[in-house]
Image (spheres, rainbow, N blue to C red):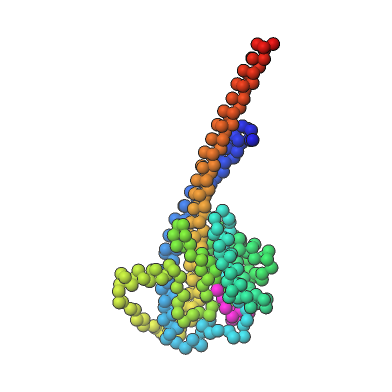
Amino acid sequence: MASLRDIRNRITSVRNTQQVTRAMKMVAAAKLRKAQERIFRTRPYAFKIGEIISHLKGQVDPATHPLFMPRPEATGVLLIIVTADRGLAGAFNTNIIKLAETAIQEQYAGAHERGDLYLICVGRKGHDHFRKRGYQLVGDFRGVFNDLSFDTVQAVMKLAIDGYLEDRWGEVAVVYNEFRNTIAQNRIVEPLLPIRAEQFLTPVMRQEIEHQAEVKPGQEVDYIFEPDAATILEALVPRYLNYQLWRVLLESNAAEQGARMVAMDNATSNAEELLRTLKLQYNRARQDAITTELIEIVSGANALEAG
């Protein structure tokens, strides 16, 4: 049985851990508020520019832009996997890594066996995981969430687009956590290249479209393009790809902070429950020690009287 000193030391250790987890929860909550503000500002523009691109693609010959056309000579596949730079966020990183591995096994097994599978891992956790397992990594984007900026997006998309135009890979997809609410995320595998005829819709995007349809039923938008659709398309496509990836990083960042806040809240609650158990164990051990001392005193007194 643990001694009173051991139990006291453990109580002190758990109490200190609880203070850390409570502080981390408060920091994550503050970061989550900022991340939510950024993603709520970004989503409408990202959704609308995707809608315009889909409409434009129906107005012109897809062959007018190379990013619309499949690359039949390219056998490679590029996956952009977005994880966090740090842990202590529950199953946030583990779930997205498992989703990426499942996609590789089920959708890109042929490319993986041929050695034509390439990964861009945004975030330290994904980078370290796949590097240790011998995957072909392109670029190094660890630590980007410490100071997330649009420059990171442009660097990642430049690698993806250059490799696509050089026939290094014929398909580009991104794997990430979409922010749904504070306690839940949607795990998404979203195709980026070639640009699809129809806009890819995540669960949050579908929900937003359904909400807009209820608010403004029966309203459709007809666009007038000047100077012409092809010229506008040439200017919008790079912006569209950059902004879609920017939205992805902001979604992942907000989802990470929400997951960390929940994980630290659970850890704080578990520490409180453990403290109650340890205090009860301490009191029982103390009572046993006092009882033992009393028995020894009484036994000693009786022995003296008998002597």
Figure check: 305 above or below 244: above
Q: Quadrant of the N terminus?
A: top right
Figure check: 288 above or below 199: above
Give the residue drawn at x 54%, y 39%: 277
Q: Return the residue nearer the eye: 150 or 247.
A: 247
- Magenta-span inclusion, residue 165: yes
Q: Return the residue nearer the eye: 280 or 244.
A: 280
Give the residue drawn at x 64%, y 65%: 130
Give the residue drawn at x 51%, y 58%: 256
- Magenta-span inclusion, residue 107: no
**Residue 40 in picture, x, y percent from top left:** 42, 63
Left or right: where 208 falls relative to 107: left
The answer, for residue 262, to whether it is visible in the render is yes
Give the magenta range: 164-173
Q: How many marks?
A: 0
**Residue 251 in picture, x, y percent from top left:** 48, 64
Left or right: where 164 falls relative to 234: right
**Residue 212 in picture, x, y percent from top left:** 34, 70
**Residue 39 in picture, x, y percent from top left:** 45, 63
Q: Return the residue nearer the eye: 142 or 262.
A: 262
Q: Residue furthest front?
A: 306
Figure check: 258 above or below 234: above
Q: Quadrant of the C terminus?
A: top right
